[in-house]
Image (cartoon, grey):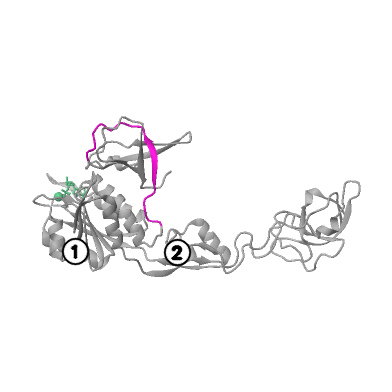
């Protein structure tokens, strides 16, 4: 078991224990947000045939050679083809077919002129310039070619991927099962939102924040429940979590006080400890263990500490558990505009919000940064990394920010 390790080492140890995944087939209409468990390969061209991008006349370019204002060339219109239909005949010398946007290019035609650019009289059009071969033609396969991979295994299915699948006639996709995350809240003081508060009690907020965060990552939270700081009771809850889910997250009791019994519970459970304590603030009292091939992540009970460590360690792990290829938090550099008056002897993460203004990227802090402060998680979409040994921030420092929520 490793102790007092870096965030990166903790993340790697967790990822090393990440086991994916069952797959299932879903209908295209239900596929949004799911993770592809297969490459999507085009079995057809998009578009499936050569077609016109505008309303106009289809012709053989060679028939228009030498046309000019002084010597217009006349072609006879032999047919009209709307989108969704095909011409019943080909172009022969001196003829043209009127085609509407999206209609297939008739046999023998290799150029389209838009209808506003010709003079029409009766069944004749006259052109005042020569066309070149391929002018105004959308070629079959111009967008997607047969055999092309249009979306890769491990990608989240987005609206355009759904559209591409529909265009290709693919109505079923193989996706990874959504990981189930068991949530166990520990603490004698905790009551649920539905219960009245007795003196000394607080409401369990972590369970709800974490349910939401799990859903945001496409995982299914399984609320096992709230349990007192008693080893046996906690063991029983974690066991239920292991039965019902792919991973267990506990909150509370992860420190080293008299009532911090998660480590004891993990030992009693016979789980193998992976690490204990990470060198970050907030969230130092974090631990992880593995049992039956499933990871148990023990977070601090302090609302901000638990949520921040969930984001730093839990999100990459759950993304990988979900089958995603890109699971790491994106990082960027930004100027932190606010002051933070404390020195940081330890590596620290501050809650902030990205500000995109006048082509500049900046971060404003979202409020008080204490371990137990939940309100400043609201609006927080980046965690700003303050390296160990940093003095107080004066405002204007360029620091690395980890993107933890979607921007916008
Ligand atoms: P602990 O990690 O058990 O030492 O708890 C640290 C602080 O977080 C204490 O003030 C707890 O009351 C509080 N806390 C623990 N669990 C939760 C929870 N599920 N929701 C809100 N606060 C909690
Ligand atoms: Mg406690």
Q: Position of residue 274 (x, y in %)?
A: 21, 59
Q: Residue furthest top?
A: 394
Vertical comparison of 334 with 247: above or below: above
Residue 2 makes an appearance in the image:
yes
Q: Residue furthest right?
A: 70
Find out if the beta carbon at label 2 lies less than 8 Å from the nearest ligand 1 atom: no
Residue picked out by circle 1? 272
Which stretch is magenta? 326-345
Find out if the beta carbon at label 1 lies less than 8 Å from the nearest ligand 1 atom: no
In this rendered view, identify the residue nearer to me: 372 or 193: 372
Q: Where is the C terminus found, in terms of image quarters?
A: top left
Whether residue 229 sits left or right of residue 334 in the image: it is left
Q: Secondary structure at mark 2?
A: loop
Q: Secondary structure at mark 1?
A: strand
In this rendered view, identify the residue nearer to me: 96 or 8: 8
Q: Where is the N terminus found, in terms of image quarters?
A: bottom left
Q: Is residue 344 magenta?
A: yes
In this rendered view, identify the residue nearer to me: 379 or 382: 382
User: In the image, which disc is placed on residue 153?
Assistant: 2
Work out whether mark 1 precedes mark 2 in sequence or the reverse, and give the earlier one.
2
The residue sitting at 80% across, 67% down in the picture is 90
The residue sitting at 39% across, 69% down in the picture is 23
Vertical comparison of 82 with 402: above or below: below
Q: Position of residue 147 (x, y in %)?
A: 57, 68
Between the residue at mark 1 and the residue at mark 2, the CA separation in whole angstroms equals 32 Å
């Amino acid at each position: 078991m490793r102790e007092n390790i870096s965030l990166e080492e903790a993340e790697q140890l967790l990822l090393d224990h990440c086991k994916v995944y069952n797959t299932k087939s879903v209908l295209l209409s239900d596929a949004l947000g799911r993770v592809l468990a297969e490459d999507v390969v085009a079995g057809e061209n998009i578009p499936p045939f050569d077609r016109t991008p505008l309303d106009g006349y289809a012709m053989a370019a060679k028939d228009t050679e030498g046309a000019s204002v002084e010597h217009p060339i006349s072609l006879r219109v032999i047919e009209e083809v709307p989108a969704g239909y095909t011409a019943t005949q080909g172009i022969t010398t001196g003829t043209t077919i009127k085609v509407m946007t999206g209609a297939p290019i008739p046999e023998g035609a290799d150029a389209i002129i838009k209808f506003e650019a010709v003079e029409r009289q009766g069944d004749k059009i006259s052109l005042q310039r020569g066309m070149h071969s391929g002018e105004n033609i959308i070629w079959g396969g111009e967008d997607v070619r047969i055999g092309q991979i249009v979306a890769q295994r491990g990608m989240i299915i987005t609206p355009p991927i759904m559209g591409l699948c529909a265009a290709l006639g693919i109505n079923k996709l193989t996706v990874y099962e959504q990981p189930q995350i068991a949530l166990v809240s520990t603490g004698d003081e905790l009551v649920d939102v539905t219960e009245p508060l007795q003196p000394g009690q607080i409401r369990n907020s972590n369970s709800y924040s974490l349910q939401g965060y799990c859903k945001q990552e496409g995982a299914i939270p399984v609320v096992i429940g709230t349990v007192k700081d008693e080893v046996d009771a906690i063991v029983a809850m974690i066991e239920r979590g292991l039965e019902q889910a792919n991973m267990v997250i506990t909150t509370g009791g992860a420190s080293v006080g008299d009532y911090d019994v998660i480590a004891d519970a993990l030992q009693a459970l016979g789980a193998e400890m992976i690490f204990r304590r990470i060198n970050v603030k907030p969230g130092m009292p974090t631990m992880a263990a593995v049992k039956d091939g499933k990871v148990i992540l023990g977070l601090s009970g302090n609302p901000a500490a638990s949520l921040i460590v969930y984001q730093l360690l839990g999100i990459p792990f759950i993304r990988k558990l979900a089958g995603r290829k890109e699971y790491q938090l994106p990082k960027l550099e930004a100027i932190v505009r606010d002051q933070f008056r404390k020195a940081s002897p330890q590596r620290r993460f501050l809650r902030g919000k990205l500000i995109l203004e006048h082509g500049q990227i900046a971060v404003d802090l979202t409020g008080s940064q204490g371990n137990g402060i939940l309100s400043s998680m609201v609006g927080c979409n980046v965690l700003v990394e303050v390296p160990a040994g940093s003095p107080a921030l004066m405002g204007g420092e360029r620091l690395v920010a980890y993107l933890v929520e979607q921007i916008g």
